[in-house]
Image (cartoon, rainbow, N blue to C red):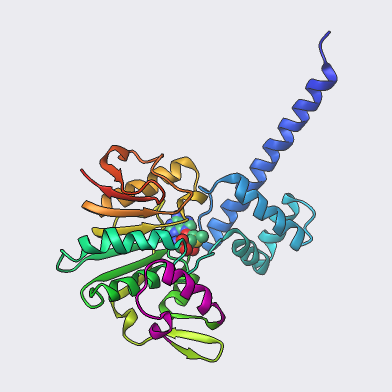
Amino acid sequence: MADHGGSAMTQEYMSSLDETRAELSALLELVYERTGEDFRQYKHPSMLRRVLRCVEAENAGSLHGLLDCARRDADCLLRLRAALTLHVTSMFRDPAFFRLIKERVLPSLQTYPYPRLWIAGCSTGQELYSYLILLDEAGLGDRCALYGTDLSDGVLDFARAGTLDASLLEDYEAGYRLAGGQRSLREYFEIEGRYMRLRPGLLSTASFAVHNLVTDASFNEFHLISCRNVLMYLDEAAQRRALEVIHDSLVPLGFLGLGNSESLMQALHRPDYERLDPAEPLYRRVR
Ligand SMILES: C[S@@+](CC[C@H](N)C(=O)[O-])C[C@H]1O[C@@H](n2cnc3c(N)ncnc32)[C@H](O)[C@@H]1O
């Protein structure tokens, strides 16, 4: 006998799932229309988790309630945008990766008269600062250019300022040493109370600009592109597009660094890359 009760429940479940998807898409569309920040290509389960936290924080009762609130109240919309954005970063995050950069990549960059590096999705700048310091120690400090880009304008203001919370210095110092740093990290900063600021001049080779890896095109050619912990938030189609922009921006024999849970799986040009290390996601474009 057919289980009508079961199939009715399944139908109800499927239609509530469709409703959730539609409401989530409407929220992401609203954020895009009103703020220009585009989360529509992000993996939906991770967006949903963050949106549901926002439903609770705003006391909105449901996704529909949050949609109503965000339509009416510009502050609610900005809080929602902030909840969707993930800017977690650190200096010498994954020190073994930076040790490999020092040992395998910098000697090759030294052979170029003026190497260019692109730190895509650089957040508040700590990743780019890590490269700056390693380049300085390799004698490349004043003959290189670093470009830090991010989807979000707000984080780039922090990146440009070069100011960090001084209480993090010890943690950063530990990462720097594990990455093979030769001095003391303190030498690169001036401590000002609770803050530390990169020494004047260190940031002179760095430029920052808004760039969306999914919707914007390539803007230059680079010898190293570091795009760490960004692809992991994008759905497969968006990862493919971002990897195309990266491919178009990398010189032959250029290097590409990804985050530890990222890979070239979605890359159309995957055969053009050789992985340089079994443990670290560092690649070289060989064709
Ligand atoms: C988790 S942080 C990683 C920061 C840094 N790369 C690191 O590994 O420490 C991810 C950053 O990627 C940025 N981002 C996300 N999607 C992006 C996109 N489509 N284009 C450019 N940046 C993006 C976010 O704004 C955020 O600042």
Q: Quadrant of the C terminus?
A: top left
Q: Which residues are magenta?
A: 167-189
- For residue 183, what is the image quadrant? bottom left
Q: Quadrant of the N terminus?
A: top right
Q: Is residue 200 above or below residue 5?
A: below
As drawn, the residue found furthest toward the bottom would be 193
Q: Is residue 43 above or below residue 176?
A: above
Who's the residue at 25% across and 59% down the image? Answer: 222
Who's the residue at 80% across and 23% down the image? Answer: 8
As drawn, the residue found furthest toward the top would be 1
Whether residue 85 is visible here, answered yes or no, is yes
Q: Nearer the viewer, residue 34 or 190?
A: 190
Q: Is residue 116 above or below residue 44?
A: below
Residue 2: image x %, image y %?
81, 11
Q: Nearer the viewer, residue 7 or 255?
A: 255
Who's the residue at 22% across and 63% down the image? Answer: 107
Q: Nearer the viewer, residue 230 or 28?
A: 230
Who's the residue at 53% across and 83% down the image? Answer: 166
- For residue 162, what is the image quadrant? bottom left
Q: Main secondary structure of the magenta part?
A: helix
